Image: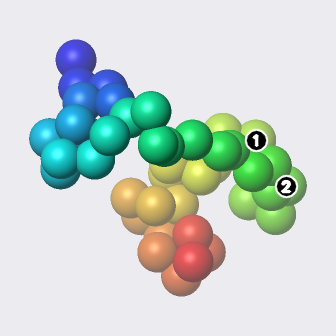
Amino acid sequence: MLTFNDLVTIEGIDTAQVRLVRHQDGRLGSGRLYEAWRNDRAAFE
């Protein structure tokens, strides 16, 4: 499985300098963020 840290490391970024922050946004409804990214880019943006 590819993780967030794997992606950061592949790009040559020091993981000690990175913070992953997840913001809550209820406009899309629970569990719809990934679905919107894949299927409805306008809603995602």
User: Which residue, as the protein is rendered here, is positioned at the far bottom?
Assistant: 42
Residue 18, percent across and down?
48, 43
| Residue in the image at 28% along x and 47% along y | 13
The answer, for residue 29, to whether it is visible in the render is no
Residue 44 visible in the current orientation: yes
Residue 4: name its quadrant. top left
Q: Looking at the image, which residue sits at the far right?
A: 26
Tell me the tag on residue 26.
2
> Circle 1 sits on which residue?
30
Question: Which x, y percent locates residue 9?
Answer: 22, 37
The vertical placement of 33 against 2, above or below, is below
Pick whichever, 26 or 12, lies toward us. 12
Q: CA distance from mark 2 to mark 1?
A: 7 Å
Circles 2 and 1, Cβ within 8 Å, touching? The answer is: yes
- Kind of residue at disc 1: Ser
Quadrant location of the N terminus?
top left
Q: Which residue lies at the image location 57% right of the left edge and 77% below the top edge? A: 45
Left or right, 29 with reference to 19:
right
Asked where in the image residue 20 lies, by quadrant, the reply is top right
Give the secondary structure at mark 1.
loop
What colour scheme was applied to this rendering of the protein?
rainbow
Residue found at the far top of this picture = 1
Indicate left or right for 38 with 19 as reference.
left
Mark 1 surroundings: few (<14), some (14-19) or many (≥20) residues within 10 A: few
Identify the residue shown where x is 57% and y is 41%: 19
State how many labels appear: 2
Residue 37 at x, y percent in the picture: 46, 61
* Closer to the camera in the image, 28 or 14: 14
Q: Is residue 14 left or right of residue 18?
A: left
**Quick one: 17 or 32, which is closer to the camera?**
17
Q: Amino acid at mark 2?
A: Gly
**Residue drawn at the location 57% of the way across and 69% of the way down:** 44
